[in-house]
């Protein structure tokens, strides 16, 4: 089930006495996980990390004194240890991911009922994944702004009936929030319509879409059932919903529905990519980014078999080279590239299609 059977040393960082106990008691019962200590805040963690040398850190984002974001900005450049955020529904989780955290889990609250078992199962799975992840050390220039491309009617691509009917589908998991941003922020406002699956809990997908919308030239929004896929807009699959591309006449739109998990996920990249293979065929482009497991691999293979152009993130730039690796090994990827180079390859392909 997990990528490694080694014992993973975990440091728990949380200012809540009650929640620290919940985490420590439940993690200590899990196979291959050893809780080697805890810290009551970021200052305490800074003292204990050199002494305990953890493999993975779980950390609340909102803590008194030094918050999780500022702590990560100090920790990751000097000591790139995988960090899993344990967060309530809060936009700050994306700033913490931008600062170098590997992944996050949503802290259970009253609205979720007594859901500790599912929460701990998710956390345990992500700790195992994080123990083998490549920690991304952010560059100094992290700030990105809207360009003037949104105000330019045709950006860098110009009018094209062919591109108006082109759809780009992108799938990602662990490490994907920043990987997807690094691709989208380089694309002009008149990029063909995009549909995106990022493995993420409900609530966070809306905040993530809003964040991308602020930082990218394309319009980005959380998808709603029946939304049309139009040039210049990217639709993010809502958390805990499946999303398909459907064609009615000459118009493409998305179907968002409460289906079963596929490839272990809801939303699933395979569901999206398979619908692209069925509905869009040669007018489709598929991009598969960093993530553990194989979700999207079979779907992108079908996309390529049906005439789509496909791109996979390369090993060197992945936080977890899982999904794109399986897709490549199955023959579903036309070309592999780093996140930094994927926009260039995509733009070259789009210009050749005009």
Image (cartoon, rainbow, N blue to C red):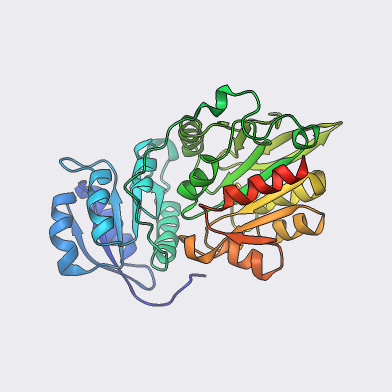
In the image, 43: left or right of 122? left
Residue 25 location (% of width, % of height): 28, 61
Quadrant occupied by the C terminus = top right
In the image, 225: left or right of 105? right
Residue 178 location (% of width, % of height): 45, 47
- Residue 47 picture quarter: bottom left
Residue 41 location (% of width, % of height): 17, 49
Q: Taking 186 as reference, is 35 above or below it?
A: below
In the image, 105: left or right of 321? left
Residue at image position (71%, 67%) is 331
Residue at image position (20%, 59%) is 38
Residue 129 seen in the current view: yes
Residue 121 location (% of width, % of height): 44, 58
Q: Camera-side residue: 329 or 117?
A: 329
Q: Camera-side residue: 157 or 331?
A: 157
Residue 261 seen in the current view: no
Q: Taking 76 as reference, is 209 above or below it?
A: above
Q: Farthest residue in the bottom direction?
A: 6
- Numbered label tally: 0
Q: Taking 130 as reference, is 238 above or below it?
A: above
């Amino acid at each position: 089930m997990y990528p490694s059977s080694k014992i993973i040393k975990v440091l728990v960082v949380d200012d809540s006495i009650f929640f620290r106990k919940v985490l420590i008691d439940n993690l200590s019962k899990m196979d291959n996980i050893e809780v080697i200590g805890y810290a009551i805040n970021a200052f305490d963690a800074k003292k204990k990390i050199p002494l305990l040398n953890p493999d993975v850190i779980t950390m609340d984002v909102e803590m008194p004194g030094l918050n999780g974001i500022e702590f990560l900005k100090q920790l990751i450049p000097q000591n790139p240890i995988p960090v899993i955020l344990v967060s309530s529904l809060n936009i700050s989780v994306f700033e913490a991911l931008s600062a170098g955290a590997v992944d996050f889990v949503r802290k259970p609250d009253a609205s979720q009922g007594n859901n500790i078992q599912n929460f701990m199962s998710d956390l345990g799975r992500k700790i195992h994944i994080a123990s083998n992840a490549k920690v991304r050390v952010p560059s100094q220039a992290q700030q990105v702004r809207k360009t003037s491309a949104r105000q330019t009617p045709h950006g860098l691509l110009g009018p094209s009936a062919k591109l108006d009917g082109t759809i780009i589908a992108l799938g990602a998991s662990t490490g994907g929030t920043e990987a997807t941003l690094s691709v989208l922020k380089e694309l002009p406002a008149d990029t063909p319509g995009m549909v995106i699956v990022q493995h993420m809990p409900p609530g966070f997908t809306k905040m993530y879409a809003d964040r991308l919308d602020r930082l990218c030239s394309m319009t980005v929004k959380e998808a709603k059932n029946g939304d049309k896929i139009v040039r210049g807009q990217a639709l993010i699959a809502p958390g805990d919903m499946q999303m398909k591309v459907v064609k009615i006449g000459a118009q493409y739109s998305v179907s968002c529905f409460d289906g079963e998990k596929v490839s272990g996920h809801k939303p699933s990249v395979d569901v999206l990519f398979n619908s692209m293979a069925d509905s869009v065929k040669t007018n489709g482009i598929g991009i598969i980014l960093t993530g553990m497991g194989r979700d999207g691999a079979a779907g992108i293979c079908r996309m390529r078999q049906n005439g789509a152009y496909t791109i996979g993130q390369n090993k060197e730039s992945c936080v977890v080279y899982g999904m794109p690796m399986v897709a490549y090994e199955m023959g579903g990827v036309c070309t592999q590239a780093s996140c930094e180079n994927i926009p260039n390859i995509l733009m070259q392909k789009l210009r050749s299609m005009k």
